[in-house]
Amino acid sequence: MSIRARKIPVLIRFALHHSRVLQIAVIIGFWALGEGLVRRFDLPVPGGIIGMVLVLALLASGVISPLSMRRGAYWLLAEMLLFFVPAVMAVLDHHEFVGLLGLKLLAVIVIGTGLVMGGTALTVDLCYRWQVRHALH
Amino acid sequence: MPFTEATALAVFWSAATIVFYIGARTLHRLRPCWWLSPLIVTPTALLILALTLHTGYRDYIRGTHWLVALLGPVTVAFALPIYEQRALIRRQWPVLLIGVLVGSGIAMTTAWALASVLGLSDSLRLSLMPRSVTTPFAMAVSSDIGGLPDLTALFVVLTGVCGAALGDAMLKWLPLRSSLARGALFGMGAHGAGVAKAHQIGSEEGSIAGLVMVLAGLFNVLVAPLLSYCLRAFA
């Protein structure tokens, strides 16, 4: 193999490690692969989850480096709001939310969220204290 | 011609969504107070524009559903933070697991119970149940259990806003000693908005909140088929 031919994988890796657009393309590729697998085997989970598990497996086994996806992945996560804002516009079709029904929905969300936050935090804190106490003895 | 008109509408609403989002993000960077968060400003501005132009949701989403489809790759992207937090997972997995289990359980049962008490319709109740996990996961759970994913996205956003606003008061009232509990409070209760808030308190709280958010989403999606089976059995 000539030196130039051997350089090609190195060049690809360099490009992948430095281009956010390429990394996003790779992530979209994994998502498409996940969707394909879900359709092929009729799996009960979304394709994105299968893609995520595949990426996790490849990262954990050292086949791919986190550097080849890191910038693209954190960009997608940081701009996530843009991708779900269109769905929020569904409220346009729900004029009935203006009024008592809207207040009821808000009540469910506010009370529920308060209980979730309090319940989760107290449970975790209790577990943490239990763990600390048992680590000492 | 109908084709070009549809294309023009799609381009217009996609551009409006992206421009408003970038504008809201810039505004928040200049004036970082909670009610100017892009989470509130972007949908509000778009709603005002849609209402003034008399555009319905069907026309709006026809041109912008490609943005929602990108939530699939966002789900894949969650692999990175999970992988990079593997040391934290290895050290604290029992506590994290219990927190996610308890938090998801409370979220689902309170949504179910409160919606029943207030006499909300079945589809609203099912759309409310997954509202405590981050949007891509919540929408997947919602369609799995028979809710309306678009409404779930709306409830998820409201939950995030409300959780981020409640969080400070909760921290003051609850006798929490560990950063683990403070992080879990925000990650479980207010997903993305909560993680941002937790990062303001401390980097450890921030990482824990992010991890709890992802694990809760993953857990909910994985139990959704079972949950939908149970819901159908009891209905």
Image (spheres, coloured by chain):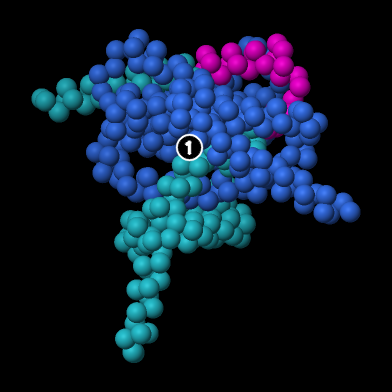
In the rendered image of the structure, the colour used to display chain A is cyan
In the rendered image of the structure, the colour used to display chain B is blue
Coordinates of residue B209 in the picture (x, y in percent) = 37, 32
Coordinates of residue A133 in the picture (x, y in percent) = 17, 22
Coordinates of residue B30 in the picture (x, y in percent) = 46, 30
The chain carrying label 1 is: B
The residue pinned by badge 1 equals B217
Picture quadrant where residue B1 is located: bottom right
Q: Is residue A121 above or below residue A65?
A: above
**Image quadrant occupied by the C terminus of chain A:** top left
Q: Is residue A131 left or right of residue B216?
A: left
**Image quadrant occupied by the N terminus of chain A:** bottom left
Q: Is residue B88 above or below residue A43?
A: above
Q: Residue furthest front?
A: B30
**Residue lying at 38% horizontally and 53% vertically, measured from the top left:** A70
Q: Residue furthest bottom?
A: A1
The reply to whether residue B109 is in sight is no
Please check the rendered image and state whether residue A90 is part of the magenta-colored stretch, yes or no: yes
* Secondary structure of the residue carrying numbered label 1: helix
The reply to whether residue B70 is in sight is yes
Picture quadrant where residue B198 is located: top left
Q: Is residue A36 left or right of residue A89?
A: left
Please check the rendered image and state whether residue B32 is part of the magenta-colored stretch, yes or no: no
Q: Which residues are magenta?
A: A89-112
**Residue lying at 45% horizontally and 57% vertically, measured from the top left:** A20
Classified by dominant secondary structure, the portion drawn in magenta counts as helix
Q: Nearer the viewer, residue B192 or B118?
A: B192
